[in-house]
Image: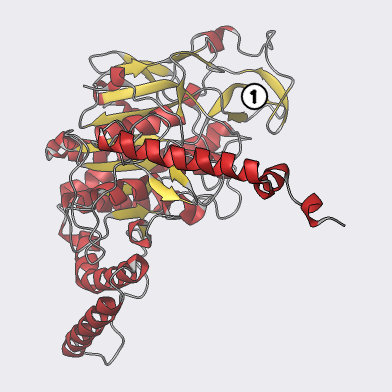
Amino acid sequence: MNEAENLSQAGRDLLDRRGFLNKTGAAFGGLGLAQLLSQQGLLGADDPTNFSGKAPVRPDIDPNNPYAPRDPHFDMPAKQVLVIYCPGAVSHVDTFDWKPDLAKYHGKKPPGIPEVTFEGPTGNIAKPFWDFKPRGESGKMTSDLLPEMGKHVDDFCFFHALHTQTSAHPQGENFFNTGFTQEGFPSFGAWVTYALGSECSELPAFVAINDPRGMARSGKNNFGSAFLPASFQGTDFNAKNPPANLQRPAGYTASDDLKTVDLLKRLNAKHLSQFPGDADLAARIASYELAGQMQMSVPEIMDLSGEPASIHKSYGTDSGTDLKREYAKNCILARRLLEKGVRVVQLFNGSDPSGGNGITNWDSHSDIANSHAMQAEIMDQPTGALLADLKARGMMENTLVVWCTEFGRMPFLQGNGTGRDHNPDAFTCFMTGAGVKKGYSYGKSDEWGQKAVEDPTTIYDFNATILHLMGLDHERLSYYHNGLERRLTNVHGHVIHKALA
């Protein structure tokens, strides 16, 4: 058999003298042209660009000090961000998105309602389970389910036309917190600390305060670093459960501890000098050194006994259910972390250790009147007090607060007649604080709150706006991974300028 027959057409052409000269001549001609264009300054920029035509911005990270503060892409008032995340999908039509037509069609099933949704057959339209009232000087209509949070509506910027790509909780959490429905992508907090570092040298740059009942459905993926350097993952602890392995062993004195730390510092420095380009090694050393600093700083930050009695009373650490009291302590902890300069604090209200469905989070497929009321009793007073406390201390001038959930709930009941199913096509979140327009509502859902109809807003848009408020260009903040420039907003998203102050 002729071996040439096993070659491609391009390969056979190279075996032919004329074909060889033709192809190599063209190649060398291209190299010559590139050289001439380079000499005349006519080539494109050396830096690679992404689909938007912008060059990626690489933060200048010292591997020996990955948490050092770094400048934003442009100046914005928000220097820190508090994300209050509610797993399980809060019902927008029972909280912040007032729809009078729900009362008009209550108990009916008008045309246009789907026969089946995420969990099965649909029932009739149901009016809100709690009355709506005008609040604040703006007269914004919000429900009696969250009256303490409702007191702050004049400071809120509502997004009423959010929609998402999924109606499943794990994928919904992933999408909101990482920009992708799949696992394996960095969280929002990891992106921010990768870009900006932290003003606090004795605490993590990114802290995830999990609900007293445990983690949300997607667990550590909600605050993980994925392919970003490990330094930028969130450190999870709450007022009840400090970070693991910080206690000094019995019989081990403070002097012994200091000597050990000093020895490790010298050994680490020597080891790092042998491998100066190993970012993973540097991150691991920095992580251990931070853990050593946290042995003294974390017990202090978690000691709430020094807080005035008025603070404990306003947050509700001494009233209500055990869960409410523990969540109230988490809210105080969040404020204390922000005061210390922690860059990103993610505060969870809800978990999913046993499937949720209104027991451990906001997922209310049945008995929504009681399940949502239980969750609201935990969240409302402490969160309202946290917002008031941040404002009273002047911290809102430089702190962005984001309240969010993965999707909404349907305006009609499920077939069981007591719960609302998942609604990915319309839901409400809000921002408040640094750089955000006050007393403003952006976008609208339809007359029933079923679909986003005016200024529909994607999660990409929402996250792009948060990054912008932190002084970061979502189109330029990227990380080269597996041949792609990865971003929190993938290849999508637009900053919602109408929501900016």
The percent coordinates of residue 13 (x first, y second) are 68, 43
Return the x and y of residue 265 as percentages of the image width and height: 21, 80
The residue nearer to you, when weighing 328 against 340, is 340
Query: How far across and down, in percent of the image, does residue 444 sit?
Result: 44, 14
Can you say whether 42 is above or below 187 in the image? above
Residue furthest bottom in the image: 251
Question: In the figure, is residue 296 to the left or right of 490?
Answer: left
The residue that appears at 28% across and 79% down in the rendered structure is 274
Horizontal placement of 11 versus 93: left or right? right
x 28%, y 25%: residue: 156
Q: Which residue is found at the position 24% from the left and 25% from the top?
A: 155
Residue 87 visible somewhere in the drawing? no
Quadrant of the rendering where the N terminus is positioned: bottom right
In the figure, is residue 218 to the left or right of 434?
Answer: right
The front one of 309 and 121 is 121
Rendered image quadrant of residue 301: bottom left
Badge 1 marks a residue whose secondary structure is strand
Task: Count the numbered circles shown.
Answer: 1
Residue furthest to the front: 17
Is residue 177 found left or right of 10 in the rendered image? left
The residue depicted at 22 percent of the width and 32 percent of the height is 433
Q: Mark 1: which amino acid?
A: Leu
Assess disc 1: are there few (<14), some (14-19) or many (≥20) residues with their C-alpha within 10 Å of its C-alpha.
many
Q: Is residue 112 above or below residue 467?
A: above
Q: Which residue is mark 1?
A: 413
In the image shown, does 152 or 488 lie closer to the viewer? 488
- In the rendering, at what x and y percent does residue 417 appear? 68, 26
Q: Is residue 89 visible?
A: yes
